């Protein structure tokens, strides 16, 4: 008996140990998967030379044959002044062509709440990063509401910030403004994005020379995998503003005299410089698929290392590059034989190209030759120029587009001549295409590598793959769709309606649910609004055209609708049928709202309907006297609210339950245009997903620019000029408030200030506050502290309180006007 019991105990112990071992192995596998979790590219924003500002325009450029190179723009007199075609002349640059952006001085300062004073002193890289970050998030369907404090990490790669040099004149330090610090500097470009958009994730500015923006991609991937943020922006920026750097590069003979990077060619003689800004929005792939984001490509693995003890600090190190390529493939868990294309660094230098190709061969060559399908090599630098700190992100966006379209653009022009003879092409199995070619059909997967190395010795490699979406039902609209558009001013709303209308006229009916879902839930709402309902894309396009033809100028809602009530009367069965019809049309409305007892909601259709409205941002109270026991054979359900001095009541139930979804959309359209802060993601039709090819916000750009100093030093725009605002004739509140508004306008260097806006809305910040109060205290004694002034209140109220304090202090004899 004892032996039997002992045997049973041992058996039980062994079974427990086996179960524990299985759980531990499963947990180890889970942790390993987390460490290698794939990351989705869900959106892109870009400014590439000469005037490429959408992914569609970039792809068209890549598939063409045009070069982005041009002569030095007129607004870069310093670069022009140092040009001399004689190579090697001290203090001179022999280059007069590069990939220049056609305009870098324009910016929508009002959209981002930046004052005119600050906008002029901001490095144009920061300005364009704000716009491209916004566009990348809009293309991902991520609505940026500052109050939401989204968990977005910012990872910015940038080599230089040369714009502030325009204020550096030791003989006239009055050009140094408070924004000299924050207007430039590598850390402030990333920090400004997060600050103005209200993000909570990590913010990093990275400088590893030409591999800077690829390093940020690696860090962003790691941040997402480690749970440091839910969304990430990996960005790169580069502008050519300094004659000093151009001269320095020419003194090292690093630059090609004709300004072009001739990647892999026999004529390679240095690299050609270029400008550009690029941002990619990233998420973990599982989160992106769960949220229905547009997955443009998948980042499978990344790696970064350093050359270490190479032959020189700036010389590439082949063995180190092999190490980083192997590490990225291991992180991606992808066999070298699966790689069909590599976007090489490809600077077009005699030393760099053979070393890089040799490193690729050392890792991929054997597998490529064994499979028999050549490995395609390319570098966008030969077309755009070398974007230095932003070159990596330009390569990433190119690769994403290639994986999407399944086409490899030509890497060299047919007239470019022979390939670099120092590279044994016939032995490698590598190909530099001379024409656009479909992705090799022999390869079962669409996998690409991106290689990057910097002059500082930092090497980065990434492995990307085309997305294979999971099998999900196609989206299907149940009846007419609600389309919402908004902007910060009427002119921008009109332009946006025009662009969306043009897209809708070309759209297939099957895209209707996705298009409307993206515009409703993937865009932040602004003060000027319109909403239309239609059953087809053409219906919506015609409704937008009608709205534009009417020429009615929209007015910004002063306050959102108030006292929203829901009346529900009639038989419980009919109420239940209405609720069921809404849930069938919009599955996202089925879940009980947070904080609601599920059992109570399930039993009470009126409570369930209020819960559905709450998920849409409509927090309605039961109407007085309303109840299911009211007389009458038919249900009465209506929603009412107060806005613009009147009360609006709209029905949510019609002749039958099938009318409810359409009536709800009509009510939401009215609420939206009245200024309600709606959350319309749950209104999506079954299977609806975000799409990335819709028009983004139409920024209203104005010129903000500091010319390079020439000749004798002069006062800069940051210098304080003598006060130009005349003192008020009296200390009466109205006159004093007017004076303070004029003074603030001068400090902000604004053309006009709307007294209905707040201090923060007009671009005020801590610097402006200090400058303004200092100017006031030069003239008056102020009897209140800054803590007593709310920067969120309208300017006429804020300055009115300040005027009252000044007047009261003067009357008490504690201070008088100068």
Image (cartoon, grey):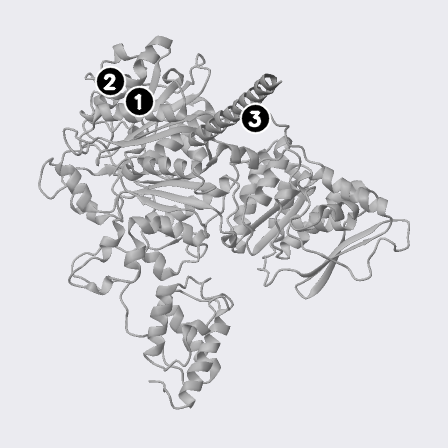
Quarter in which the N terminus is drawn: top right
User: Can you identify the residue that label 3 sits on?
Assistant: 470
Few, some or many residues within 10 Å of mark 1 (<14, 14–19, 20+): many
Q: Are marks 1 and 2 in contact (CB under 8 Å)?
A: yes
Residue at 28% x, 57% y is 181
Residue 60 x, y percent position in the rendering: 42, 30
Q: What secondary structure is marked by label 2?
A: loop
User: In the drawing, does residue 88 fall left or right of residue 471?
Assistant: left
Give residue 601's position: percent from left, percent from top.
74, 47
| The disc label shown at residue 419, or none | 2
Disc 3 versus disc 2: nearer the observer: 3
User: 675 and 205: which one is in front?
Assistant: 205
Q: What's the CA distance linking mark 1 and mark 2? A: 9 Å
Disc marking residue 412: 1
Which of disc 2 and disc 1 is earlier in sequence? Answer: 1
- Sequence order check, earlier mark of 3 and 1: 1
Secondary structure of the residue carrying numbered label 1: loop
* CA distance separating discs 3 and 2: 42 Å
Quarter containing the C terminus:
bottom left
666 left or right, relative to 408: right
Closest to the observer, 588 or 482: 588
């Amino acid at each position: 008996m004892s032996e039997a019991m002992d045997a049973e105990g041992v058996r039980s112990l062994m079974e427990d140990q086996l179960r524990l071992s299985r759980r531990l192995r499963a947990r180890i596998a889970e942790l390993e998967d987390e460490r290698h979790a794939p990351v989705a590219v869900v959106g892109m924003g870009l400014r590439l030379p000469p005037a490429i500002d959408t992914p569609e325009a970039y792809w068209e450029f890549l598939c063409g044959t045009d070069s982005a190179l041009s002569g030095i723009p007129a607004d870069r007199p310093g670069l022009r002044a140092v040009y001399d075609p004689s190579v090697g002349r001290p203090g001179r640059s022999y280059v007069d062509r590069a990939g220049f952006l056609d305009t870098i001085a324009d910016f929508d300062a009002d959209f981002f709440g930046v004052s005119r004073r600050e906008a002029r002193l901001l490095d144009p890289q920061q300005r364009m990063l704000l716009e491209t970050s916004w566009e990348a998030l809009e293309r991902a369907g991520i609505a940026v509401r500052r109050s939401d404090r989204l968990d977005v990490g910012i990872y910015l790669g940038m080599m230089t910030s040369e714009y502030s040099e325009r204020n550096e004149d030791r003989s006239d330090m009055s050009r140094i403004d408070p924004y000299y610090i924050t207007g430039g500097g590598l850390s402030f470009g990333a920090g400004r994005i997060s600050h103005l958009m209200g993000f909570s994730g990590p913010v990093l500015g990275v400088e590893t020379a030409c591999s800077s923006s690829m390093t940020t991609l690696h860090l962003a991937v790691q941040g997402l995998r480690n749970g440091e943020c839910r969304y990430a922006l990996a960005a790169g920026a580069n502008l050519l503003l300094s004659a000093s750097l151009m001269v320095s590069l020419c003194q090292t003979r690093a630059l090609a005299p004709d300004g072009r990077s001739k990647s892999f060619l026999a004529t390679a003689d240095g690299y050609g410089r270029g400008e550009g800004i690029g941002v990619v929005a990233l998420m973990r792939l599982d989160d992106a698929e769960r949220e229905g984001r547009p997955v443009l490509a998948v980042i499978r693995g990344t790696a970064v290392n350093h050359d270490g003890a190479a032959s020189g600090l700036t010389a590439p190190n082949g063995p180190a590059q092999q190490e980083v390529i192997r590490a990225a493939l291991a992180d991606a868990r992808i066999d070298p034989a699966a790689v069909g294309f590599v976007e090489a660094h490809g600077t077009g230098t005699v030393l760099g190209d053979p070393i890089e190709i040799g490193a690729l061969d050392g890792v991929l060559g054997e597998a490529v030759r064994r499979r028999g399908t050549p490995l395609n090599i390319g570098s966008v630098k030969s077309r755009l120029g070398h974007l230095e700190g932003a070159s990596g992100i330009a390569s990433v966006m190119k690769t994403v587009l290639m994986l999407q379209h399944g086409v490899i653009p030509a890497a060299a022009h047919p007239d470019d001549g022979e390939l670099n003879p120092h590279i044994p092409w016939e032995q490698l199995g590598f190909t530099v295409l001379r024409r656009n070619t479909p992705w090799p059909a022999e390869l079962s997967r669409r996998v690409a590598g991106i290689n990057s190395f910097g002059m500082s010795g930092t090497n980065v490699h990434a492995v990307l793959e085309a997305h294979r979406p999971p099998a999900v039902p196609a989206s299907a609209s149940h009846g007419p769709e609600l389309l919402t558009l908004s902007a910060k001013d009427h002119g921008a709303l009109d332009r946006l309606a025009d662009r969306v209308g043009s897209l809708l006229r070309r759209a297939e009916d099957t895209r209707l649910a996705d298009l409307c879902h993206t515009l409703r839930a993937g865009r932040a709402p602004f003060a000027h609004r319109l909403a239309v309902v239609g059953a087809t894309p053409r219906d919506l396009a015609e409704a937008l055209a009608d709205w534009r033809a009417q020429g009615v100028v929209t007015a910004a809602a002063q306050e959102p609708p108030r006292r929203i009530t829901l009346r529900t009367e009639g038989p419980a069965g009919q109420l239940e049928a209405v609720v069921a019809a809404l849930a069938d049309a919009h599955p996202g409305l089925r879940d009980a709202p947070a904080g609601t007892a599920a059992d109570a909601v399930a039993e009470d259709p009126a409570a369930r309907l209020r819960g559905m409205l709450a998920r849409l941002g409509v927090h309605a109270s039961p109407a007085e006297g309303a109840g299911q026991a009211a007389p009458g054979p038919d249900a009465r359900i209506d929603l009412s609210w107060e806005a613009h001095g009147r009360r609006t009541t709209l029905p949510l139930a019609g002749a039958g339950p099938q009318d409810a979804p359409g009536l709800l959309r009509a009510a939401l359209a009215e609420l939206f245009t009245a200024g309600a802060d709606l959350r319309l993601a749950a209104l999506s039709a079954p299977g609806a997903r975000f799409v990335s090819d819709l028009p983004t916000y139409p920024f209203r750009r104005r010129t903000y620019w500091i010319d390079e100093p020439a000749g004798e030093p002069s006062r800069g725009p940051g210098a304080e000029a003598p006060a130009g605002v005349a003192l008020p004739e009296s200390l009466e509140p109205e006159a004093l408030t007017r004076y303070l508004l004029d003074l603030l306008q001068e400090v902000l260097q604004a053309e006009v200030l709307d007294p209905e806006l707040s201090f923060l809305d007009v671009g005020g910040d801590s610097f402006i506050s200090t400058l303004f109060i200092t100017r006031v205290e030069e003239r008056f004694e102020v009897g209140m502290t800054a803590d007593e002034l709310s920067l969120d209140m309208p300017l006429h109220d804020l300055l009115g309180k300040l005027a009252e304090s000044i007047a009261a202090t003067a009357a008490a004899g504690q201070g008088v006007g100068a």
